[in-house]
Amino acid sequence: MRLVIATCSVDYVGRLTAHLPSATRLLLVKADGSVSIHADDRAYKPLMWMSPPCTTVDADGTWTVTNKAGEQLVITVEEVLSDVTHALGSDPGLVKDGVEKHLQELLA
């Protein structure tokens, strides 16, 4: 997983167009190729994202992320504050004990 904190602007070109003006954001690039752009005030939901399969080309500070339908995220990086990559390995998955209904009954 690659985690980049950068000042950047983002444009989506596809079924519609969308623009994020320049601000400091978290760019998350997962091993499956997906890319998501996050702000600090939106909990877990990204501002924009591109699901796999997609390809990323980094040329002169501009990342162009393209999916198989031809939709693109164009990320213009102005300043990189942090750029780290970590190998997370295989995830063992989520193990659940009970369901939400059981929790609601216990809390009632």
Image (cartoon, rainbow, N blue to C red):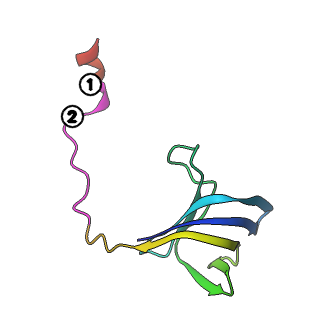
Give the answer, above or below, for where 55 lies relative to 80: below
Q: Which amino acid is tagged 2?
A: Gly
Residue at the (31%, 30%) spot, across then down = 100
Question: Which quadrant is the C terminus positioned in?
Answer: top left
Residue at the (26%, 64%) spot, across then down = 91
- Say the numbered circle drawn on residue 98: 2
- The residue lying toward the viewer, choosing from 63 and 8, is 8
Callouts 2 and 1 close, C-beta under 8 Å: yes
Q: Which amino acid is tagged 1?
A: Leu
Give the answer, above or below, for where 69 lies relative to 27: below
Please identify the quarter of the rendering in which residue 27 is found.
bottom right
Q: Give the magenta part as a residue range.
A: 91-102
Residue 46 shown left or right of residue 90 in the figure: right
Magenta span includes 64: no
Q: Earlier in the sequence, mark 2 or mark 1?
A: 2
- Say the numbered circle drawn on residue 103: 1
- The residue lying toward the viewer, choosing from 73 and 27, is 27
Residue at the (23%, 17%) spot, across then down = 106
Please identify the quarter of the rendering in which residue 48 is found.
bottom right
| Residue 59 percent location from the top left of the image | 66, 88
Give the answer, above or below, for where 27 lies relative to 31: above
- Secondary structure of the residue carrying tag 2 is loop
Residue at the (41%, 71%) spot, across then down = 1
Quick one: which residue is furthest to the right in this view?
A: 17
Quick one: which residue is furthest to the top in this view?
A: 108
The Cα atoms of the two marked residues, 2 and 1, are separated by 8 Å
Magenta span includes 92: yes
| Residue 15 percent location from the top left of the image | 77, 65
Magenta stretch: helix, strand or loop mostly: loop
| Residue 68 percent location from the top left of the image | 62, 79
Give the answer, above or below, for where 7 lies relative to 61: above
Please identify the quarter of the rendering in which residue 23 is found.
bottom right
